[in-house]
Image (cartoon, grey):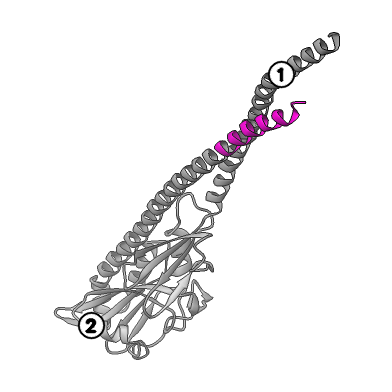
């Protein structure tokens, strides 16, 4: 008799509780995931900036070693007086100063060329001068220069052919004879070594790094610059003329979001079950007495 009333009471209580729980879960989920994203972004940015700092500090140390070697008497005498007996040792000491320096090349302004072991097919100084960046540096008052190059570089490093498109970062220092420039000393770092050994991002396994300059770009692994739903991107200045661009996958963030959503969904299910039980109990408490009253009234009529 009162089934319609029972359903109305049940539906009113259950759906009110359901909507309230759904809205609360949605708001809570958004707030939690937003905070989680901010934390993930902040931690990633800190790790990226530390990696870039390590990279620039490393390049700074290579520049210092290169400038120190360029000022050594063995190098200066080799270019000015032809005393070349110790220049190979000086270049070897430079590449041994850091495991990531793949080769050292010394150019004299008169065309002399010396290079460390493991390096071959070295371009001439006149060929380098065809590159405006080098020509500007050679003519300037600057004592050193850091740049990325993908052309006009030795084709052999570590005694093996090297693909120029992968790029090298060159730390170049002028060799002085008094006030005059006697030559140029190059310390070359393979980009893959820089990416793997120096520019690693703490806590991230699949980070991609790009070194972007006005004249060349090299990447540790391919990544989509515009895919901002799947990746985070950070840009930090490179010690030379350009930027480091870091691409960090959002996979781990989405995995954590999945766990949060699963917990909220489970909580919703528990709330809905509880709401159904409460709604059933309340509806029963209202309709059962009415059913009993109706039955009593019917019984009295029958007796009468």
Asked if residue 57 lies left or right of residue 182, the reply is right
Secondary structure beneath label 1 = helix
Secondary structure beneath label 2 = strand
Which label was assigned to residue 222? none
| Magenta segment includes 8 | yes
* Residue at 42% in and 49% down: 38
Q: Is residue 78 above or below residue 295?
A: below
* Residue at 67% in and 30% down: 10
Q: Nearer the viewer, residue 301 or 283?
A: 301
Q: Quadrant of the N terminus?
A: top right
| Magenta segment includes 254 | no
Range drawn in magenta: 1-20
Q: Quadrant of the C terminus?
A: top right
Residue neighbourhood size for the residue with mark 2, other residues' Cα within 10 Å, grouped as few (<14), some (14–19), many (≥20): many
Between marks 2 and 1, how big is the CA–CA gap?
109 Å
Q: Main secondary structure of the magenta part?
A: helix
Task: Check the image and name the residue furthest to the left.
Answer: 179
- Report which residue position mark 1 lands on: 290
The answer, for residue 103, to whether it is visible in the render is no
Task: Check the image and name the residue furthest to the front.
Answer: 304
Residue 187 position in % (x across, y down): 36, 72
Residue 70 location, quadrant: bottom left
Q: Nearer the viewer, mark 2 or mark 1?
A: 1
Q: Nearer the viewer, residue 230 or 160?
A: 230
Residue 43 position in % (x across, y down): 41, 48
Residue 300 location, quadrant: top right
- Report which residue position mark 2 lands on: 182
């Amino acid at each position: 008799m009162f089934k319609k009333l029972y359903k109305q009471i049940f539906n009113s209580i259950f759906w009110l509780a359901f909507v309230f729980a759904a809205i609360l879960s949605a708001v809570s989920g958004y707030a939690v995931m937003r905070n989680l994203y901010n934390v993930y972004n902040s931690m990633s940015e800190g790790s990226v900036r530390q990696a870039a700092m390590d990279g620039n500090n490393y390049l700074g140390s290579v520049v210092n070693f290169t400038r120190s070697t360029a000022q050594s008497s063995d190098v200066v005498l080799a270019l000015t007086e032809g005393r070349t007996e110790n220049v190979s040792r000086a270049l070897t000491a430079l590449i041994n100063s850091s495991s990531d320096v793949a080769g050292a090349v010394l150019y004299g302004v008169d065309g002399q060329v010396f290079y460390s072991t493991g390096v071959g097919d070295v371009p001439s100084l006149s060929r380098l001068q065809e590159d405006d960046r080098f020509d500007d540096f050679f003519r300037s008052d600057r004592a050193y220069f850091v740049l990325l190059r993908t052309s006009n570089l030795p084709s052999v490093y570590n005694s093996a052919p090297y693909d120029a498109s992968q790029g090298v970062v060159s730390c170049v220092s002028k060799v002085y004879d008094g006030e005059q420039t006697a030559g140029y000393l190059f310390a070359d770092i393979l980009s893959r070594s820089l990416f793997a050994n120096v520019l690693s991002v703490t806590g991230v396994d699949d980070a991609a790094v790009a070194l972007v300059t006005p004249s060349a770009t090299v990447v540790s692994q391919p990544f989509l610059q515009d895919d901002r739903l799947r990746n985070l991107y950070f840009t930090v200045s490179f010690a030379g003329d350009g930027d480091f661009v870091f691409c960090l996958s959002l996979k781990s963030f989405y995995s954590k979001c999945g766990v949060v959503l699963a917990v909220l969904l489970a909580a919703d299910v528990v709330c809905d079950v509880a709401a159904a039980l409460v709604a059933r109990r309340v509806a029963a408490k209202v309709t059962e007495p009415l059913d009993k009253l109706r039955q009593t009234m019917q019984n009295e009529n029958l007796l009468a």
